Amino acid sequence: EAQVTQNPRYLITVTGKKLTVTCSQNMNHEYMSWYRQDPGLGLRQIYYSMNVEVTDKGDVPEGYKVSRKEKRNFPLILESPSPNQTSLYFCASSLSLTGVYGYTFGSGTRLTVV
Amino acid sequence: GEDVEQSLFLSVREGDSSVINCTYTDSSSTYLYWYKQEPGAGLQLLTYIFSNMDMKQDQRLTVLLNKKDKHLSLRIADTQTGDSAIYFCAESALQASGTYKYIFGTGTRLKVLA
């Protein structure tokens, strides 16, 4: 089944403890992206990747890192999480940004930083 | 700048039609999309419309595009309780860098009353 898989689904952590949220897609998509969803703010893009080893900042990149060493994986790294990073995170991938395909989204990771 | 706006809430009775509205600012958009997010899940692409179309119908869904006013709407006929979800409008916008980017609205929470 074509899908984007994120792990974990839920995570509670303490301020300053490094964490990684994994994202993997099995559709051979070149474009991958991370978003955070907060009430009243919709989806805001954190980082995106156009292809292997090609990543760039989105609208809210502060406090996050990403890497794209393989086409299928695009992990999100929080080196020193803070409470303002408590949010619902989504990974998404797409075959093309201009076509009929749109995004395929993962199921989300709900992160709480205390 | 790029902006996609939606009203936050909509409540309808089961069996009635729902109309969810969206306004966007980027006239270079080639495709516009509607996504549905059910509770605890990621966003799922519902339908899309190419920018040179005025209307697209897909079973109970009708998408209307007024390119002059930059207004997009999603009509759901015979709304069912299973349609209760958050609906996101999105556009594929051309950036100054020459690449495209998906811009999402804030989402409209549709509540269907039995």
Image (tube, grey):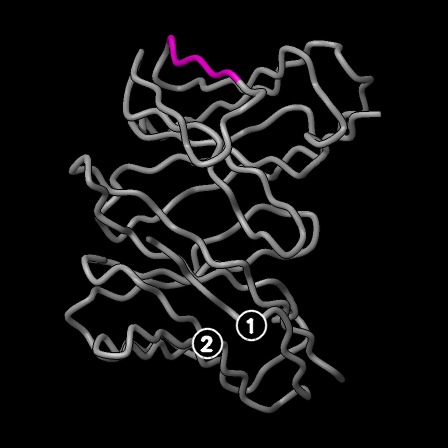
Nearer-N-terminus badge (2/1): 1
Q: Chain of mark 2?
A: B
> Mark 2 and mark 1: span between their CA atoms?
7 Å
Q: Is residue A67 magenta?
A: yes
Secondary structure state at the residue bearing disc 1: loop
**Depth order, front residue of A47/B12:** A47
Task: Report whether A73 appears left or right of B15.
Answer: left
Q: What amino acid is labelled 2 in the image?
A: Asn
Residue B7, label in figure: 1
Q: Which mark is residue B21?
A: 2
Foreground residue among A53 and B93: B93
Give a yes or no on whether discs 2 and 1 share a subunit: yes
Q: Please say if A109 is above or below B91.
A: above
Residue at horizontal 29 percent and vertical 51 percent from the top: B92
> Would you say A40 lies left or right of B35 here?
right
Of B40 and B4, nearer the camera is B4
Q: Amino acid at mark 1?
A: Ser
Residue A7 spot, x, y in % from top left: 64, 24
Q: Is residue A1 visible?
A: no
- Asked which secondary structure carries label 2, the reply is strand
Q: Position of residue B60 (x, y in %)?
A: 45, 80
Start and end of the magenta stretch? A65-69
Relative side of A104 to A9, left or right = left
> Quick one: label 2, few (<14), some, or many (20+) residues within 10 Å?
some
Magenta span has A83?
no
Label 1 marks which chain's residue?
Answer: B
Residue A79, can we see it?
yes
Query: Which residue appears at 51% of the width and 42% of the height?
Result: A44
Relative placement, left or right, of A41 versus A26 is right
Q: Are marks 2 and 1 in contact (CB under 8 Å)?
A: yes
